[in-house]
Image (cartoon, rainbow, N blue to C red):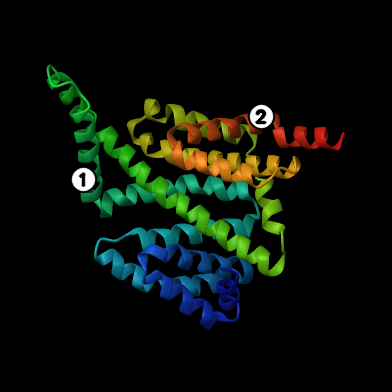
């Protein structure tokens, strides 16, 4: 990966070639987004946008065939990279994920309604299959009545996936930049990510009660949890560093997230919210020094 970053930073032509090349392959298009972000972070927004324009050409071709992930990933990651470049703040960048994800979700309604309808039908069929055979007609009718909310939820879940990959691509670009020009800098920067109390509580309230306020806000339920999740992961990395623990602790955390996602993810979100209120890392640092 470092060699790839070094090649991209040799000159505009190399960065442009690599961004276009990886944009031609949907499975690795996140590398294209990371290269565009690296150019923005290192050389400025103007240079990055020039690379983006060329990388969007194959992405638009894929979109014409119904594959929107490439163009969404490129544009979303570029927007987040511009925020990070201008603010040098991960809190501002992670907060920008929420409106970006909302735009992605509502964009899916406009350009890929069939996909949302297909996914919603699959969820409804899955729920219907879990109902008892007898006397479930009323429940089936209720499921159909909440279809609009379910479609908002499906759109939000799809936007969550795209937004997650965009943040990860941006973090990859930031780690490349650190590795080339400031070794170890990204690790320290990532471990310091922490949302302020007001922001964390607002995001948690939106995640838990958004759909009760308005059915449309169902779109934001998964997206609003993303800043909290990444803040929680930063806290865990910080604890391992402060406690001088083995990296196996981090491996265990990631294994739990993969194998027990439905349990581990909300726990991480809640822990991040508590950390915003009580600053566990600062308390752990003081305790470690004493």
> Looking at the image, is 98 positioned above or below residue 216?
below
Quarter of the image containing the C terminus? top right
Q: Which mark is residue 118?
A: 1
- Dot 1 or dot 2, earlier in sequence: 1
Q: How far apart in space, not on screen, are marks 1 and 2 (Cα)?
A: 41 Å
Q: Position of residue 18 (x, y in %)?
A: 48, 76
> Looking at the image, is 43 positioned above or below residue 119?
below
Q: Position of residue 136 (x, y in %)?
A: 15, 20
Residue found at x 55% / y 73%: 4
Please tell me in which quadrant of the rendered image residue 279 appears: top right
Callout 1 secondary element: helix
> Looking at the image, is 59 positioned above or below residue 137?
below
Q: Position of residue 238 (x, y in %)?
A: 69, 43
Number of other residues with Cα within 10 Å of mark 2, as a class: few under 14, some 14 to 19, many 20 or more: some
Residue with the most extreme top position: 135
Residue found at x 41% / y 48%: 161
Q: Position of residue 32 (x, y in %)?
A: 46, 68
Q: Which mark is residue 277?
A: 2
Residue 210 vs residue 24, the one in the foreground: 24
């Amino acid at each position: 990966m470092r060699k790839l970053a070094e090649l991209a930073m040799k000159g505009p032509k190399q960065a442009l070639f690599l961004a276009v090349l990886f944009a031609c392959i949907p499975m690795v298009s996140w590398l294209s987004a990371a290269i565009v972000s690296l150019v923005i972070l290192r050389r400025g927004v103007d240079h990055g946008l020039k690379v983006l324009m060329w990388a969007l050409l194959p992405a638009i071709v894929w979109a014409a065939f119904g594959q929107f992930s490439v163009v969404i990933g490129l544009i979303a990651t570029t927007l987040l990279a511009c925020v990070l470049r201008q603010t040098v703040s991960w809190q501002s960048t992670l907060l920008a994920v929420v409106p970006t994800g909302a735009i992605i979700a509502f964009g899916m309604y406009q350009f890929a309604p069939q996909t949302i309808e297909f996914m919603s039908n699959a969820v409804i069929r899955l729920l219907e299959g879990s109902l008892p055979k007898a006397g479930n007609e009323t429940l089936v009718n209720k499921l159909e009545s909440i279809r609009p909310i379910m479609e908002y939820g499906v759109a939000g879940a799809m936007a969550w996936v795209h937004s997650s990959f965009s943040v990860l691509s941006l973090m990859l670009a930031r780690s490349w930049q650190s590795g080339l020009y400031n070794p170890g800098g990204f690790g320290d920067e990532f471990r310091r990510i922490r949302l302020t109390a007001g922001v964390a509580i607002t995001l948690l309230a939106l995640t838990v009660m958004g759909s009760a306020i308005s059915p449309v806000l169902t779109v934001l339920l998964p997206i609003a949890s993303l800043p909290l999740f990444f803040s929680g992961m930063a806290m865990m990395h910080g604890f391992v560093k402060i406690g001088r623990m083995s990296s196996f602790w981090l491996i265990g955390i990631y294994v739990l997230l993969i194998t027990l996602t439905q349990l581990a993810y909300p726990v991480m979100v809640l822990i991040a919210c508590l950390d915003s209120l009580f600053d566990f890392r600062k308390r752990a640092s003081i305790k470690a020094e004493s």
